[in-house]
Image: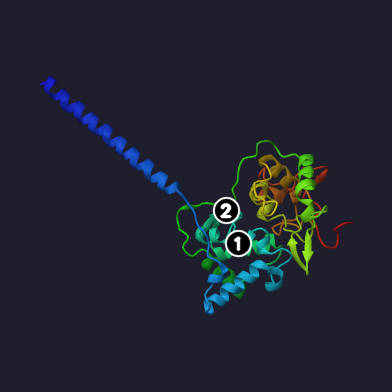
Amino acid sequence: MKILLWPLVATAFLLSACGDDEAARAAAEEAAAKEKIVTFTPPEESEIPDDEFGKMVKLGRDIFSDTPRYAPDYSGNGLSCRNCHIDNGRQHNAAPLWGAQVAYPMYRAKNGHVNTLSERIQGCFMYSMNGTKPPLGSQELIALESFAFWMAKGAPVGTKIEGAGFKKYDAPEAPDLKRGEKVYEQKCAVCHGPDGQGQKVDGRYNFPPLWGPDSYNWGAGMHQLKNASAFIRYNMPLSQGESIGAQEAVDVAYFMNSHERPQDPRFTGDLAETRKKYHDTPDSVYGTEVNGHIMGSKPATFENWGK
């Protein structure tokens, strides 16, 4: 009887093993499907509809392109959305607007809760524009959301899209200030100026200031080294993405963010406390000593700049 039972036990074991293999294979296929990266190309601006919705889309486009002019009540510096979100929010690997549209609502560790796209845009005004938040339901926010919604037409939701954010990477080596200064002089100064203050044409920055009172403040995402190095490596110099090497991008991002800029609006009144609460990461130099200066201890203002 024991001999007769053995084939049954063996068969059951094999069936169980096959079942485990099939389950593992199915799980692997499901994981692969989730990780599948798709491509997306946003529509051309010529495709904006000629109706009431289209009017709001066009206003959002104008705000995005020239923020100080079209959203002056909430803009606190000379930057426009397009300065970081290149090609008016279309370009891959430059945090394109269409990528944000399909990513939100999203949990953000920066403020510890799930953010809507409106709240995310408010943060851009507060930090990158060094300004104030447009109220929820304001024309400015509705226009920018309309522009984002239109631009993301046809973009898939719930899957990874190639180039939808910044293409972050780990630095080959620790950043070096002197190397970064050299990269800046060779590859950045011709557009952004030897002093990093950018270039204006007809009162509008064609090349934005990278530090100082008219640049993004210490709360902006671009002050973090991984964000800045990813942006620089794949987008700079303009129209010459990937011409700067991985280490060069890290070094020049470090150099760029080793200069003062406006204070983080979340500043508690104490530099060390603010760093611990909002900047406790190796990606931020805020509150640390760089070249003999504690970053954030003398935030840039138009009154003190150059003194």
- The local secondary structure at tag 1 comes to helix
Give residue 44's quadrant in the image.
bottom right
**Of the residues shown, which amino acid type is indicated by label 1?**
Gly
Give the number of the mark in front: 1 or 2.
1
- Residue 271 visible at all: yes
Q: Is residue 211 above or below residue 140?
A: above
Q: CA distance from mark 1 to mark 2?
A: 11 Å
Q: Is residue 126 above or below residue 218?
A: below
Give the quadrant of the N terminus: top left
View extreme (left): residue:
1
Residue count near mark 2 (Cα–Cα under 10 Å), binned few <14, some 14–19, many ≥20: many
* Residue highlighted by disc 1: 89
What residue is at 57 percent from the left and 53 percent from the top? 165
What residue is at 83 percent from the left and 42 percent from the top? 292
- The local secondary structure at tag 2 comes to loop
Give residue 31's quadrant in the image.
top left
